[in-house]
């Protein structure tokens, strides 16, 4: 999913909506949990029922009646189940307590049921034996609540304010509008979705449209999906859609249809923007394997949310920018075909989709666009100094859908693995994970991905994931260099932005330049301990060194010093390991780190013209200068009788 609310401090992104909504047109931010707090709290505490393991859900037929002008849904959901126990007497579903259950049938016979908060328990007319298959049908109706990102939303669009209804069930919202098994352990093997609405409106949904009939002023549309699907990806959107298709031609002569359901007022602009989906799908096919639902379709359905949601075979789209299209399409491989087995591992969905967006940029838009994408994500990640990709508390929806951590840092875990392993081994590992029959059309755990990457790289990645996945923060590098025409000595220092990781053992890329910057050379420094010395032989006298010029790492650079330079004015120390200022460049928040208990008397900030624009008394060392215009600034720190200066760059 991509959430299009401006990413955390948000000064930078256009729209994470794309995130899952993805960065404002490039990044993401989360919808605040305070919105609809009362409904949200109940869903935050959702726990998958142990009773779910008593049966396997093999098929569901949803028959719904909706009118986009009225916030209401009624219908019949028929579920075919297979017993996993010797004597199955009760079948449990999730359904919001405000939805009314009219009746329940088992084998055509009305049976009793009980309600316990958001649990609906059906008492079968007879018990089922192990592996026995049977069906139950629930007739229900009501006005759904809408928590989270808008699990059931009624709105309008266009100059004529045409009504529209859409659903978005991730993570815990499916139960708010239909009786379901809200599970990350059992996918529905197959579904039919049949929606009846007033004649002017059309329904977009999962799978293939097998019929569209009009009778007595109503339109009924029947969608058939014959792939396993997790509950939160079942979706409908209903309004006066116009539609058209793009097609990807495969080498064997087959076609994959890309079906677009858009608002009529957006038809012309959408036709111009969606064809790039063909090129993006072709790229992902080549990198990872064929689009997993090729026998049916891929599609877009426009909706009024500020981002996108990767509903299986038909993503719901708030717009059609390149990054949003790529992000939601990427989820069809990673998130839909392979689904996370726990919300704690949401990076398996969102980190992958975000990085595949970067790969689409790299392969289609080119190296410079990819470099800007990398730079932007590093800046987002380093806006704050802590935070783990592993989600400890899955009831905290803001943390779960953190654009900075689950999306950007999750993506960068993959990018750094690519740097460590090399392209061939990295992509082999991802393809092996994608082709693993243990996770195909099912659920994956973090450890399963790690095992594939370790096998492909013939190495242990325990320390890497301890640091970057479970740990928090990132390295802050400083470097001193000196030498002559034949050799250059480099001294590399690292400080961690967060105490959870004392040292990030990583190969660090550096680029050295001559004075005219006409010559350069790249080196890979295997940084295993602090104050580590390296000797390189670039073939020219080094006049400048840049750490990680191509943004392979999550890191910031504090200082790079020519050790042969002398400080003329001893009262002003332009560079010194005693203080650190990061991130630099910065977006908004910035931290001044000083050693031990040394008191800071005063912190001053000057613009490039030498004008003082801020003064702090040293009682705090964290600042938010996001309101400042882009440019160069100078920070002066008065501490223990010395004055330290740093040049800062504001993006």
Image: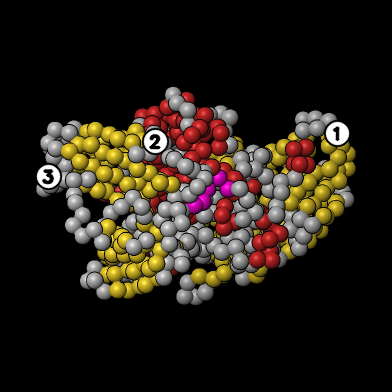
Residue 422 is situated, as x and y percent measured from the top left of the image, at 35, 32
Q: Which mark is residue 87?
A: 1
> Which circle's residue, 3 or 2, is located before the other in the chain?
3
Q: Which mark is residue 370?
A: none
| Rendered view: 326 above or below 644 | above
> Which circle's residue, 3 or 1, is located before the other in the chain?
1
Of marks 3 and 1, the one in the foreground? 3
Query: Whole-Å distance between the Cαs marked 3 and 2?
Result: 32 Å
Main SS, magenta residues: loop
- Image quadrant in which you'd find residue 541: top left
Determine whether label 3 and label 1 are within 8 Å by CB: no
Question: Is 472 on the left-hand or right-hand side of 528?
Answer: right
Residue 178 is situated, as x and y percent measured from the top left of the image, at 70, 55
Q: Residues within 10 Å of mark 1 (few under 14, many from 20)?
A: some
- Image quadrant in which you'd find residue 447: top right
Query: Whole-Å distance between the Cαs marked 2 and 1?
Result: 60 Å
Q: Which mark is residue 529?
A: 2
Q: Residue at x 50, y 37 (%)?
A: 465
Magenta residue check for 387: yes
Of marks 2 and 1, the one in the foreground? 2
Q: Mark 3 points at which residue?
A: 518
Q: What stretch is highlighted in magenta?
A: 386-391
In front of the other: 215 or 530: 530
Callout 1: helix, strand or loop?
loop
In front of the other: 307 or 589: 589
Determine whether label 2 and label 1 are within 8 Å by CB: no
């Amino acid at each position: 999913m991509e959430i299009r609310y401006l990413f955390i401090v948000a000064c930078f992104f256009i729209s994470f909506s794309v995130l899952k909504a993805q960065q404002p047109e490039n990044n993401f931010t989360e919808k605040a949990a305070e919105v609809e707090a009362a409904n949200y709290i109940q869903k935050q505490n959702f726990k998958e029922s142990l009773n779910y393991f008593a049966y396997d859900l093999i098929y569901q037929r949803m028959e719904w009646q909706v009118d986009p002008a009225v916030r209401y849904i009624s219908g019949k959901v028929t579920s075919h189940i297979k017993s996993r126990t010797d004597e199955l007497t009760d079948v449990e579903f999730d359904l919001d307590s405000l939805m009314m259950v009219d009746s329940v049938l088992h084998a055509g016979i009305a049976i009793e049921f009980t309600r316990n908060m958001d649990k609906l328990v059906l008492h079968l007319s007879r018990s089922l034996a192990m592996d026995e298959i049977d069906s139950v049908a629930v007739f229900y109706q009501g006005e759904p609540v809408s928590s989270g990102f808008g699990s059931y939303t009624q709105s309008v669009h266009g100059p004529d304010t045409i009504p529209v209804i859409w659903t978005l069930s991730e993570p815990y919202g499916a139960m708010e509008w239909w009786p379901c098994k809200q599970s990350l352990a059992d996918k529905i093997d197959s579904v039919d979705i049949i929606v009846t609405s007033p004649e002017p409106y059309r329904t977009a949904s999962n799978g293939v449209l097998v019929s569209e009939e009009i009778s007595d002023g109503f339109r009924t549309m029947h969608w058939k999906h014959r792939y396993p699907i997790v509950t939160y990806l079942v979706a409908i959107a209903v309004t006066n859609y116009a539609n058209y298709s793009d097609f990807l031609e495969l080498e064997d002569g087959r076609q994959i249809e890309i079906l677009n359901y858009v608002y009529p007022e957006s038809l012309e602009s959408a036709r111009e923007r969606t064809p790039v989906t063909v090129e993006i799908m072709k790229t992902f096919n080549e990198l990872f394997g064929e689009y997993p639902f090729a026998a049916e379709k891929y599609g877009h359905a426009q909706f009024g949310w500020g981002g996108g949601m990767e509903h299986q075979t038909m993503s719901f789209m708030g717009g059609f920018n390149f990054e949003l299209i790529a992000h939601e399409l990427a989820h069809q491989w990673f998130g839909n075909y392979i689904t996370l087995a726990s919300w704690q591992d949401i990076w398996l969905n969102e980190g992958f989709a975000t990085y595949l967006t970067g790969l689409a940029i790299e392969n289609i838009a080119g190296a410079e666009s990819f470099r800007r994408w990398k730079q932007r994500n590093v800046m987002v990640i380093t806006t704050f100094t802590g935070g783990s990709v592993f989600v400890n508390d899955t009831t905290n929806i803001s943390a779960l859908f953190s654009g900075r951590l689950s999306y950007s840092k999750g993506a960068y875990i993959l990018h750094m693995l690519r740097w460590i392993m090399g392209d061939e081994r990295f992509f082999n590992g991802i393809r092996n994970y994608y082709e693993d029959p243990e996770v195909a059309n099912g659920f994956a755990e973090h450890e399963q991905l790690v095992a594939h990457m370790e096998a492909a790289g013939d190495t242990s990645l325990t320390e890497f994931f301890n640091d970057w996945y479970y740990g928090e923060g990132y390295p802050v590098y400083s470097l001193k260099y000196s030498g002559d025409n034949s050799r250059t000595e480099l001294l590399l220092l690292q400080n961690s932005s967060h105490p959870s990781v004392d040292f990030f053992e990583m190969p660090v890329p550096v680029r050295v330049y001559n004075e005219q910057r006409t010559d350069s050379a790249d080196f890979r420094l295997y940084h295993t301990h602090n104050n580590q010395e390296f000797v390189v032989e670039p073939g020219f006298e080094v006049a400048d060194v840049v750490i990680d010029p191509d943004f392979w790492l999550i890191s910031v650079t504090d200082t790079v010093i020519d050790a042969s330079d002398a400080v003329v004015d001893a009262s002003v120390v332009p560079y010194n390991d005693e203080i650190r200022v990061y991130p630099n460049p910065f977006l908004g928040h910035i931290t001044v780190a000083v050693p031990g208990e040394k008191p800071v008397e005063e912190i001053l900030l000057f613009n490039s013209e030498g004008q003082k624009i801020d003064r702090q008394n040293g009682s705090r060392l964290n600042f938010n200068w996001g309101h400042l215009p882009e440019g160069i600034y100078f920070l002066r720190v008065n501490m223990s009788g010395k004055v330290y200066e740093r040049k800062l760059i504001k993006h």
